[in-house]
Amino acid sequence: MIRVLIADDEPLIRAGIRMILTSAEDIEVVAEAPDGREAVELARRHLVDVALLDIRMPVMDGLDALAELRRTAPGVRALILTTFGERENVLRALRQGGAGFLLKDSAPGELIGAVRAAAAGDAYLSPAATRHVADSLVHAPDTGRAARARARVSALSEREREVLALLGEGLSNADAGRRIHMSEATVKTYVSRILAKLECENRVQAALLARDAGLGG
C-alpha cells in the first residue's frame, strides 16, 4: 500500500482528494494536515510514502514544508498541488527536490497516477501545466543560472546530454527510447547515471537543468 498524507488548509479540498485516492486499491490516506508544520510532523510519525502539499497554507507553507521534509524525512516523496498562477513557486519547489506537481482540478485518474509515479521513485509533471512552466523558463531573465547549468552539463558524455535533452522535453523513458532507438531499460540506466553526475534528486530537477542549459527546447 502507498501511504499518503494530504496537506491543504481547505477541508473540502482534502475531503475530495481523500475520496479520489481511497478509490484506488493500492493507496491509503493515513494522515491529513491543515498546515505545513503539522504536515511535516505527521509525515514523519506515520511513515508516509507520498505527501501532497498545497503551496499556500498557514503556519508553514508547502514550499517550506517541502524543504523541511527534504532535511528530516528524505524518504517522503512530495507532490505539489498548484494553480496556473503559482508558476514561480512551482519552479522553486521542483528545483529543491519536489517529486512533481499537478493542478488542483486534475482528473481523478491523473491524481492517482501522480501518486503512484511518485511512490515508484519517478517524477510527475502535469501535462496541462508543463507548457506553462516551460514558458516561465524561456522568458525568465538570465541571472547566471544558464551559465551554471551549462557548466554542470559539460560533465556529461554526448549520449548522456542527448538523453538529458529528451528529459528537458518532458519525455518518458519509453518515449525517449523510441526517439533515439534505445530500449526503455537502457534509457533508465542513462537517467540514473545522469542524476548521479548532476546531483539531481529526480528527473524533474534534471529536466529543469536541461532547459536552463538550453537543451530540450
Image (cartoon, rainbow, N blue to C red):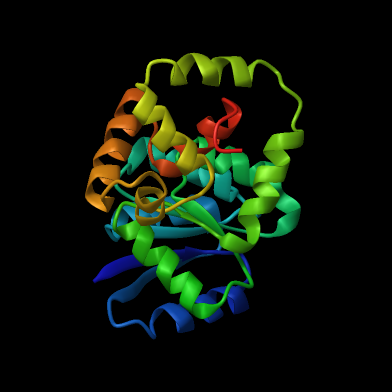
Query: What residue lies at 29% left-to-right and 46% top-to-bottom?
Result: 182
Query: What residue lies at 43% left-to-right and 49% top-to-bottom?
Result: 99
Query: Which is nearer the eye, 155 or 13?
Result: 155
In the figure, residue 5 lies in which quadrant? bottom left
- Residue 204, position in %: x, y? 47, 43
- Left/right placement of residue 17 relative to residue 85 reads left
Q: Is residue 115 above or below residue 180?
A: below
- Left/right placement of residue 113 relative to residue 217 reads left
In the figure, residue 82 lies in which quadrant? bottom right
Looking at the rendered image, the quarter that the C terminus falls into is top right
The number of discs equals: 0
- Residue 93, position in %: x, y? 55, 42
Q: Is residue 67 visible?
A: no
Query: What residue lies at 24% left-to-right and 44% top-to-bottom?
Result: 186
Q: Is residue 143 above or below residue 140?
A: above
Looking at the rendered image, the quarter that the N terminus falls into is bottom left
- Left/right placement of residue 190 relative to residue 7 reads left
- Residue 21, position in %: x, y? 42, 78
